[in-house]
Amino acid sequence: MDKIDKIINDLEKFLETLIEKNKNSLKEGRFIVRPGIAYDRFDITAFEGSYDGSLSGLVHHYLYEKGHYKKFLPAAEFKKCEKIVKNEPEGIYGPEDDESVQRALDEIHGTAAGVVGRKLLSLKIKIPDDFKEHLINIGAIENLDSKKEKVTKKKDNSTTTSEGLDSKNKPYYVYLSNNPEQKIIYQELHKLFTSHLSLFKSGILAVNYYKNYDFLIYPTDGSYKCSFYTLIHHILFNHKIYEKAFSDTNLEKAKKAMKVDPLSPPALDDEGNSKMDEYVNDSIYFVYLYCRDKKLNNVFVDINKHIENYSLGWPLLE
């Protein structure tokens, strides 16, 4: 068991115990808890907007007060974290350019939300709809309503999409591919898109991923700089898919691109380009489904243009 697994185990026990101690008030719909940490007032179902008093805030202060940050953060990052704890207690720590640390934090915070949601549901406590939808979107709980609907549709011999996706809320990466590398890409896209959904709806159609660079969430013609294609390149690199699925030559080209021009993809050989195109095209189908089901009308025109230009045969979005 590595450091992160031990931290997550400790966090899970803390959250489950905290919920047990507060179950009477939680059953009454009062989700504010006082765990004796930091400013001692957190809503364990709050996940959007300000970090102040949210579940993320609780996890952040717990990691600091229990010494967990110090176990996995590099010394320089821990100093930054400690400064935030002391000077900006209403905020939370996040690295500026350390992808491995960010992945660890994403795993910790995602696990925390799942633990809280499942524990509340196990106690038959009704959770707020927005928190429930968030848990479904990150794959922490199952959308039972959609499951019942799917069973009913099967009985009626109704049709679903080509991949059996008749629910807009289930995590897409569970269904779209049996390829383990492609599933990693879907999972990362789903996490990124869910965390940026409010921005998408406001018209900002990009995700912040590497060193605070923004990458488009939809395919476009023209420059590769900060494109969706380059976003997939970064996911491949950060999740070591280049090492698993590409030749050593293409791996070195990817490493060079990350150092020399991280906003553009590498110049791979024909075999590498073919594999990259496969990952990108499969990922575009994820984008298509996500934007359709979240009704992100402001990106429909660009996606429809791509469908027509490449004769993909998917129903146009409207």
Image (cartoon, rainbow, N blue to C red):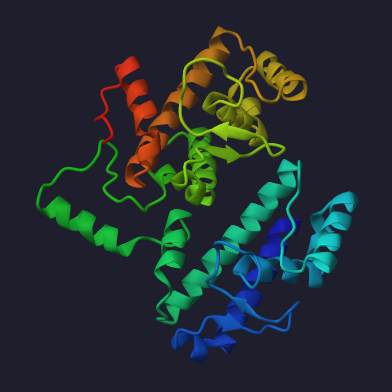
* Residue 146 in sight: yes
Where residue 131 sits: x, y (%)?
46, 66
Q: Is residue 307 above or below residue 138?
A: above
Q: Residue furthest front?
A: 202
Q: Based on the displayed image, in which of its 4 quarters is residue 311 positioned?
A: top left
Vertical placement of residue 55 versus 188, above or below: below
* Residue 150: x %, y % from top left: 22, 54
Residue at screen point 36% across, 47% down? 294
Task: Give the side of residue 318 with respect to residue 10, left or right.
Answer: left
Number of numbered discs on residues: 0
> Taking 248 as reference, is 187 above or below it?
below
Please name whichever residue, 80 or 5, is drawn nearer the observer in this view of the structure: 80
Instruction: Give left or right: position of 19 versus 162.
Output: right
Q: Residue 49: x percent and y percent?
A: 57, 62
Q: Quadrant of the N terminus?
A: bottom right
Q: Residue 308 falls in which quadrant of the image?
A: top left
- Seen from this angle, which residue lies furthest top? 270
Q: Is residue 267 above or below residue 82?
A: above
Name the one closer to the observer, 149 or 76. 76
Residue name at image x 46 percent, y 25 percent: 219
Question: Extreme bottom residue here?
Answer: 24
Q: Is residue 6 left or right of residue 73?
A: left
Percent position of residue 91, x then y = 72, 63
